[in-house]
Amino acid sequence: MPGDLLTGLWTSNTAPQWHAADWERLFSQARRARLLGRVAWLLQTRGWTDCAPPEARVHLHNALRAVARQRQAAHWEVDCVRRAIGHLPTPVVLLKGAAYVLADLPPAKSRRFGDIDILVAAPALGAVEAALAAHGWAAMPLDPYDDRYYRQWSHELPPLRHEERGTMLDVHHCITQPGSRFAVDAQRLLADARPLQGQPGLMVLSPADMVLHAAAHLMQEGDLSRGLRDLLDMHDLLTCFGAQPDFWPALVDRAATLGLCEPLLDVLTQAQCKLGLVVPQPAWQQLQQQSARPLRHRLTAAMLAVALRPNHPDADCRSTRLVRAWFYLRAHRIRMPLHRTLPHLLHKAWLRLRHRPPGLT
């Protein structure tokens, strides 16, 4: 789209030659997508920072400083979590942003994130929640329906907030919901998790599982307005891990084992088209053979390309919003069976109507 300056930046081979208004539009799009730090890192590593106007360079510098501060804060927060639950008989596996930072993976160099995510064994959830509560983490206030949703149907506890620091912690017992079409056996993930070097008591998912978690999360995420960030994370992981000669065959085999070939194929298609990812042909052919619905894949690819546009008035349109609404409904249908999806969506719609400010129609 003409107004979309963000998407094409990652595959551009030439420095941007923009007016001040274009830089302002880029920053606005990047902030909405939570990608300003990544934009700053990209421009710096390619030597393009001087192309920006002086006032824009200040914002780029501040974005990189904010990423560096958050990396330091993440180390502290993860250490607090370890001291709280490290004695319990369960693996403690870092997920997503915290895993990238502590394992020093490429996405951590420019990525900002809002909370710490961990994975523990389901039988230990009660003990984990109690130990975290003793160290200041308490569940966010929820209505009875939402609390029951998390505890009976979700793959994680209700979000926890530290009473002093205000930091957020998400405690998962799996990476997908138990009733999901992409339901994953969490024991397989825990069995293949790797110790985190220099961080005794902490682990991260295996390289293949880390990529598959990113793919499953993106395709089950109801709000794709910030999906480009997750796609860039996955691109970074694949570029890093793909340097190992046995990674791609292992990834496809693992996707088949965990039942995640469909989301992996969908996300790899977007990473190829939007970010120029190179997937080895044998792995690509094997993955396509695992997908029994090529027509569905082509339709999803076309719609996903639209849904991943920047969530910004300059790059948005009615068709984008309609496609995102379709993915919102689709994500709920993936996560839950139909008999649970419909009541859940009706409940959420009722809450939105109930809490709508007076005077709005």
Image (tube, helix red, strand yellow):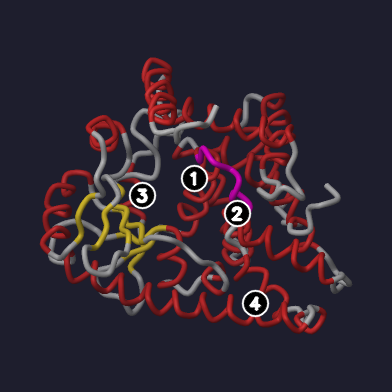
Q: Amino acid at mark 4?
A: His
Q: How many marks?
A: 4
Foreground label between 2 and 1? 1
Say what secondary structure mark 3 lies in. helix
Q: Do the CB atoms of the residues marked 3 and 2 lie less than 8 Å apart?
A: no
Residue pointed to by mark 1: 217
Residue pointed to by mark 2: 248
Left or right of 320 in this view: 333: left
Q: In the figure, 155 relative to 193: above or below?
A: above
Q: Amino acid at mark 3?
A: Leu
3 or 2: tag closer to the N-terminus: 3
Foreground label between 3 and 2? 3
Q: Do the CB atoms of the residues marked 4 and 1 lie less than 8 Å apart?
A: no
Q: Residue at x 27, y 69 (%)?
A: 165
Q: Can you say which quadrant of the picture contains the C terminus?
A: top right
Question: Magenta span covers which residues?
Answer: 221-229
